Image (cartoon, grey):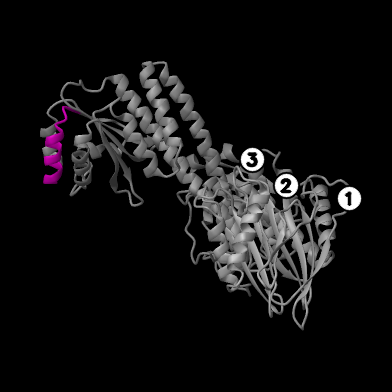
Amino acid sequence: MNARGGPVAARTAGTTRVGSVDMGGSRTGTGTGTRRGVRPAPAAQTHVDLDDPARSAAVRRLLPAGTDNPVVARLAALAAHVAGTSSAHVSLVDTRTTVVGGHGLAAGLLDAPPLERHATVCARVAARGGPLLVRDVADEDDATRAMLGEGADAPASVRSYLGVPLLDSLGRAVGVVCVYDEEPRDWGDDDVAMVRDVADAVAAELERGATEAERNEAQAALHAVGRDHTEALVALVASASDSLTASLEPDDAVRSLVRLTVPALADWSVVTLLDDHGAPRDVGWWHRDPGLLGVTETFARHRLVGRTEPVGSLATLEGSTPYVVSADVLAVARATLRSEEALDALTTLDPTSVVVVPIASRGRVDGTITLARGAGRPPLSEAETAAALDIGRRTSVVLGHGRDLLRHRSASEELQRSLLTPPVTPPGATVEARYAPATDAAHVGGDWYDAFALGERTTMLVVGDVAGHDVAAAAAMGQLRSMVRGLGVTAFASPGALLDEVDLAVDRLRLDVSATAVVCRLRSRPEGGGRLTWAAAGHPPALLVEPDGSPLLLPAHGLMLGLGGDGRRRMQQQRDLAPGSTLLLFTDGLVERRGESLDAGLQRLCDAVEGLAGRPLAEMVDGLLAAMLPSGHTDDVAVLAVRLDGG
């Protein structure tokens, strides 16, 4: 390995065709098919101008968020796990290529200085605008072998390679997530799709970090501005900041904003946001006189009708300069408004001065704030206008943060769901699994379920919960789930021993992760019923529902995973299951509530089960989720239910 942006630095120009993948991204060899719920590789690629100033600025914005970021490092490890390779890394590509997260062979690249872009394979992937797949470097021409490390002066280590562009929130290729191995590899659509899922999660994490830095910068700017304004204006800006950060929904945030600006800055106010298509829409309004609030609403609902040109107040959407009218407001309005209803309403409101400030930050305009004053109040002063501009900038930063958190949630949830493959169904049984993400964007994370076969009539059932609620937790979940599967299938079919070995692997690999889990081995009998063996690592008890609907908790004690262990083996228990029995495994989000004990939550679950036990399994599970989860639940939930036939 001698490349900062790829397994080995490129020394000569690459070819337009590498391995069994052409520039269109279609695989010419036999593939593994497309995994359900995961995007296939795109049918065509678009060349990316790596010298585009906007793209370079986007890379520089994200680079600090990726440096020394443990989440990015963990996601690189996850990319290797899901692709089944020994190594992976994440690179950002500007004029130089910088590795910001690595696993396996790539770990040594993190301390190396960035390489010139032309010398790295990652720059080539970013410029392609699509995935680059190499089955075996040894089969390629001299240029490709040199690029990937099989030239005479490079170590013969990397044999197969898959790189996927890392796209920012505007779809610009800012870097690459790549996986590679020391053996030849037949890549398929599944591999591309899984690495792309990880790339989406990396992009969301980088965006979150960059936005958080911008928020901190905005707060520092507000403090600096405060020295030049009156105490009242500084307090207003601070109050607006607090109100805006209380909600992640743009409309909710700005509805609180209009009330803060009235009457401190204006007699009445209207807030406008750009929709997904760039069209303005008024989303909030307020008037200091309750009797004129309805007139203000009429004005807001009609003032944009028929207006398409960026003139008048809409000119503010084109840049960062306030639009100010200090006299003859109605005469100016008649030249720009196209709606008689809006003109009539504005005549009733009778403003004598208007200031429209942009909701904008870092060159991005999200909308405007219209501030109007009537007779008896002078136009806004320079200090007041500056305060309004600060509020507009702060609003834009907070709205951007909200959007990024929602993207972060979406990426976490998509990654989570892509890793939760459908569980197997044991012979003579029915299985239902559910994953319910938290409604809070910041609390989607590491809950998982799994069911995999150990033999013809033996199935391992697992539910676990990784500490944390973010992309990092989802990535750690993928690592632990792979460990449990691999160790369970190959060597340790006993639930207690399996948990002990997973704990040992976490310790030896020095993984920074902790989790709870319950593992059950179910052996079904041809005549009906079965034998259940279970063990737990700090996890809530499983619930057995007898054929007559009676609930019975199956507690098991054991230290949670990732705490180093205390040398003692986890105990496991056994129980015969009658035909018609139902086993329910779940994570703590199903039963835990703030201010309520775990015992109380488990009792609520038992009560709910008794009322639903007679229903088909799918209806029972859905009914439990509806009964147990409040609207706006703050923790994600995984549920795995198995019902034995008969009874």
Whether residue 341 appears in magenta in the rendering, the answer is yes
Residue 88 x, y percent position in the rendering: 68, 53
Write down the residue under mark 2: 513
Distance from disc 2 to disc 3, alpha carbons, whole Å, reads 15 Å
Query: Dot 1: within a 10 Å radius of its alpha carbon, few (fewer than 14), some, or many (20 or more) residues?
Result: few
Residue 272 % position (x, y): 30, 41
Lateral position of residue 438 relative to residue 155, left or right: left
Magenta span of residues? 339-353
Q: Is residue 184 visible?
A: yes
Q: Secondary structure at mark 3?
A: loop
Query: Mark 2 belongs to which amino acid?
Result: Val
Tell me the kind of residue under disc 1: Arg
At which x and y percent is residue 119? 62, 47
Nearer the observer, 268 or 32: 268
Q: Which mark is residue 568?
A: 1
Q: Is residue 224 above or below residue 198?
A: above
Picture quarter containing residue 165? Answer: bottom right
Q: Which sits in the foreground, 398 or 61?
A: 398
Helix, strand or loop at label 1? It is loop
Disc nearest the viewer among 1 and 2 = 1
Give the residue furthest to the right: 567
Which is more N-terminal, label 2 or label 1? 2
Label 2 CA crowd tier, 10 Å (few <14, some 14–19, many 20+): some
